[in-house]
Image (tube, grey):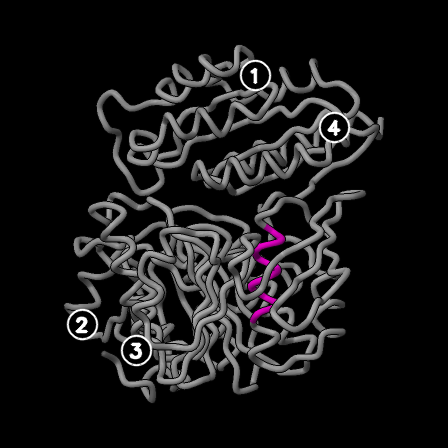
Amino acid sequence: MIPKKVLMKKDSIHFIGIGGIGMSGLAEYCLNSGSRVFGSDMTETAITKRLKELGAGIFIGHAADNIDSKIDLVVYSSAVKSDNPEMIRAKELGINTIRRAEMLGEIVNDKYLIAVSGTHGKTTTTAMIGKLLVDAGLDPLIFVGGNVQLFDGGASRFGSGKFAVVEADEYDRSFLALRPNVTVITNIDEDHLDIYKDLEDIKETFRLFCDRSKYGAYMIFCGDDDNIKSFINSINREKISYGFDEKNYLKIIDYNTKNNRLNFSILNSHSSYNDIQLNMIGKHNALNSAACFAVSKVLEIPLDIFKESISEFRTVDRRLQLKYERNGIKVYDDYSHHPVEVFASLSGLTEMTKGRIITVFQPHLYSRTRDFHKEFAQALSISDEVLLMDIYPAREKPIEGVSSELIYDELVKFNKNAKLVQDRQAIVNMLFENMKDNDVIVFQGAGDVTNLCNEFVEKLKSVNNS
């Protein structure tokens, strides 16, 4: 473990994979702290361009020459392998190296730490809680797994108060490096089965995460989730449950959707907190808001500050983000890449649309497609039409026999209006030629489907402006 005093020195730090959302947030923090920051990634992206504008030295491609003796510390993510040329060069030069998760822990564990975990919803919930603390004047340090316009479009916020709000990532068990004062668990589902053996392994790791919280910590958890409830009573900490179920300490009641906004109340044993409004859709976002409300109660933030903060909240980039609206046609960009997330987003859209729901879905990872192709088909069947793209491989190599056709073969059992489309331009053309007033078109996936969404939106704008 690298001592914190080494991390806090204003030295030269190199990030391998600096374009990753978690790495970029740390890189921005180090820039704000006065360090000289360098980093490499395989491709130039909006994130790397932003970091370059902020003063970071950016290398495109991984190469030993990117590391020299002037570098004091190399930070790497779980995706970086030991044969990475920059890792090899750092070891040759005797440069200290540290995993991203461990560096994050060194930075935030001494603060009053609010860590938001869960298979789904943690990015949005982290941003909600972070905004709440900003609005309450608590000047928090924030690290979130998505670009947030509220934080000037970045994945972090530099704050000098005693509080830190952090998205706690379960991938590769990274969150075990954190020791929270408040632990939030939004939900637990099977995912990252390239890392975990099975659901029991995932639940046990979440239990360890909870058990590592500081003495006197609070556990805020969704009481509607059976996987959380299977172990939470074994954690010797103060607990606050939230959700729609009557047995929760904080119960969501009077839920309704109107004019693309949520309205609901929260009830506990002695009070009713009425007319909470959120400029988002879907029951999953009501749950995220309830988690934020629970944090407000722990920190004794006044109700009026919470209600105003949450009503002004706008979604994190790519979390069912409305990118275009005209003639009743809406286009959304959505990061959903797990069947539970796909179902939640599409269900939310059905609450407010009068027209068809057309989904362009890009599966993320061969292993996830192999493990959940039936569940993806069931979730996507909510849509009136589905256009399936090829799998976005991310960190994986192809797996024999695994393709988007696995989802398609299941989907046609539910939904006749499904197509496999490999050509990206063909997708844009098909949507443009066949769309009708009041259609909702959603581009879903954690890969580069977002670029296709932007391309489609630009075509709509150019036609309407001509």
Give how far apart the Cα atoms at labels 4 and 2 are.
Answer: 53 Å
Q: Which residue is drawn at 65% across and 59% down?
A: 149
Give how far apart the Cα atoms at labels 2 and 1 are.
Answer: 50 Å
Give how far apart the Cα atoms at labels 3 and 4 are.
Answer: 49 Å
Q: Which of marks 3 and 2 is nearer the N terminus?
A: 3
Relative horizontal placement of residue 241, taking residue 271 as reference (left or right): left
Does dot 1 land on a helix, a strand or a loop?
Answer: helix
Query: Would you call the spot at circle 3 few (<14 residues within 10 Å), some (14-19), or many (20 or more)?
Result: many
Q: Mark 1 points at which residue?
A: 426
Q: Which of marks 2 and 1 is nearer the N terminus?
A: 2
Label 4 sits on what residue type? Leu
* Mark 1 vs mark 3: in front: 1
Percent of width and height locating residue 218:
44, 76
Q: Residue furthest top?
A: 416
Instruction: Say which of 94 and 234 sits in front.
Output: 234
Examine the image and state in which quarter residue 26 appears.
bottom left
Give how far apart the Cα atoms at labels 1 and 3 are.
Answer: 49 Å
Q: Is residue 297 visible to the viewer in this orientation of the structure? A: yes
CB within 8 Å, label 3 to label 2: no
Q: In this view, does 424 lie above or below 292?
A: above
Percent of width and height locating residue 82:
17, 56
Label 2 sits on what residue type? Leu
Label placed on residue 93: 2
